[in-house]
Amino acid sequence: MKSFSKKLLAFLVAPAIFFSFTSFPDKANFSGEWKLNEGKSELGQFGPYAPRAIKVNQKTDSIMISKIAPSFNGDEVTLTETLPFDGKEIESTVFGTSKRKASAKWSDDGQSLSITYDIMLDFNGQTTEIKGTETWALADGGKTLVSQNNYTSPFGDNQAKGVYEK
């Protein structure tokens, strides 16, 4: 019976020791202040309105994103939203009465974050819908944030890549 007890103990303890030394990759941390590098970016036709700076405060259960971008009249506008990582959709107001619904989801390996959104732009009673996905990933050892944005609107299917540096 002693032999069986020793084997059972070894069977139970060995995995505990193995897993205590095995580390699983942490999620990417996007926190910080990021500035657009236009030379490395591919902004497309809406480039003049792309965010010039992004401020991110990431917590374990959510991410707060503030994007500073030129407005249509040349002023600077800041859009801020806090997205939980549980996939819950959040609604916010952007550009006057226009609405944006968005949710965030981690990739399986935790190294990229996808933000799915639906914007209902309201210009003088005319509504335009834009649907898309913005995927974030870090590069250059965490010094670069790459934002790949794929979206559909009445203007067609578009994509833009913003490269932001700390």
Image: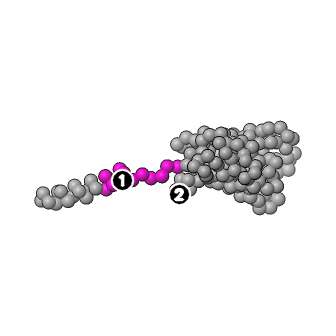
The tag on residue 19 is: 1
Give the tally of numbered discs.
Answer: 2
Q: Position of residue 12 (x, y in %)?
A: 26, 55
Question: Is residue 24 in the magenta section?
Answer: yes
Farthest residue to the left: give it.
1
First to last magenta residue range: 15-27
Q: Nearer the viewer, residue 1 or 140?
A: 140
Q: Are marks 1 and 2 in contact (CB under 8 Å)?
A: no
Q: Secondary structure at mark 2?
A: loop
Quadrant location of the C terminus in the rendered image: top right
Sequence-earlier tag: 1 or 2: 1
User: Relative to 86, is 66 on the left or the right?
Assistant: right
Report the amino acid beneath label 2: Asp
Report the amino acid beneath label 1: Phe
Query: In the image, what residue occupies the spot 59% across and 53% down?
Result: 112
In this orientation, does residue 22 appear? yes
Question: Is residue 156 in the magenta section?
Answer: no
Mark 2 surroundings within 10 Å by alpha-carbon count, few (fewer than 14), some (14 through 19), many (20 or more): few
Q: Position of residue 94 (x, y in %)?
A: 75, 42
Query: Which of pointers 1 and 2 indicates the residue nearer the eye?
Result: 1
Query: In the image, what residue occupies the spot 23% across and 56% down?
Result: 10
Q: Which residue is mark 2?
A: 108
In this orientation, does residue 151 appear? no
Q: CA distance from mark 1 to mark 2?
A: 20 Å
Q: Position of residue 131 (x, y in %)?
A: 73, 56
Quadrant location of the N terminus in the rendered image: bottom left
